[in-house]
Image (cartoon, helix red, strand yellow):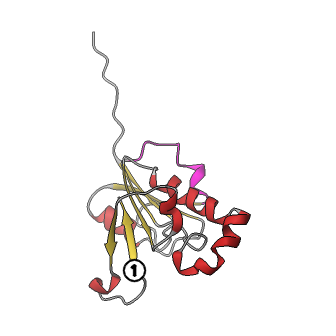
Amino acid sequence: MTLLAATPPPVDLVLCEFSGAVAAHIAASGRAVLACDLSPPEQVPGLYYQGDVRDIIRAYAFDRCVAHPPCEHQTVSASRYIADKALDGRLFWGSAFVLFCHCAGSVNLTEQPRTFWNLFYPARAQVVHPYHFGDDRKLSLIHI
């Protein structure tokens, strides 16, 4: 006798992105998506959890994760403050949260500018220049 276990449907997780743009794009492709941020959503394309990602991260085996964690404590552009941030723990805990987000799904894409978190976890990165898409803002790295 063989017992068949029900396989839950794949769900993608979008972290730290309250605009809803990434989640809307994923939902438009027909995939189930759960977005999570501390801020209220600007648009809700599907499921949205307003709160700490650590509350939900272990609730489900997420298929893919797209994360945009805060970078203010580990960015290279603020390197003149990095010694203070290293001494009081902001550098470590900011980097630890990025790593936490990067391990949330089976496949992970984590957006960060040039940061010091690579000292703790040297992930492969694809450099994305927003001006390729008509935006002159910051340089971003997509960590795979």
> The C terminus lies in which quarter of the figure?
bottom left
Q: Secondary structure at mark 1?
A: loop
Q: Nearer the viewer, residue 110 or 60?
A: 110
Picture layout, residue 64 above or below residue 73: above
Picture layout, residue 109 above or below residue 43: above
Q: Residue at x 67, y 65 (%)?
A: 86
> The N terminus lies in which quarter of the figure?
top left
Q: Residue at x 40, y 66 (%)?
A: 45
Picture layout, residue 77 above or below residue 89: below
Give the farthest residue toward the right.
Answer: 88
Rendering quarter of residue 113: bottom left
Q: Residue at x 46, y 50 (%)?
A: 104
Rendering quarter of residue 73: bottom right
Q: Residues within 10 Å of mark 1 (few under 14, many from 20)?
A: few
Total numbered badges shown on the rendered structure: 1
Q: Residue at x 61, y 58 (%)?
A: 52
Instruction: Report which residue position mark 1 lands on.
Output: 139
Q: Main secondary structure of the magenta part?
A: loop
In the picture, measured across the screen, residue 44 lies left or right of residue 10, that is: right
Please state the horizontal and vertical placement of residue 84, each as a whole percent of the image. Answer: 71, 72
Determine if the magenta segment contains residue 54: yes
Determine if the magenta segment contains residue 60: yes
Query: Where are the magenta residues, as a range?
Result: 51-62
Please state the horizontal and vertical placement of residue 76, each as a whole percent of the image. Answer: 52, 75
Please state the horizontal and vertical placement of residue 26, each as a whole percent of the image. Answer: 32, 63
Please state the horizontal and vertical placement of residue 34, each as a whole percent of the image. Answer: 44, 56
Q: Amino acid at mark 1?
A: Leu
Give the farthest residue toward the top.
Answer: 1
Q: Nearer the viewer, residue 54 or 8?
A: 54
Q: Nearer the viewer, residue 42 or 90?
A: 90
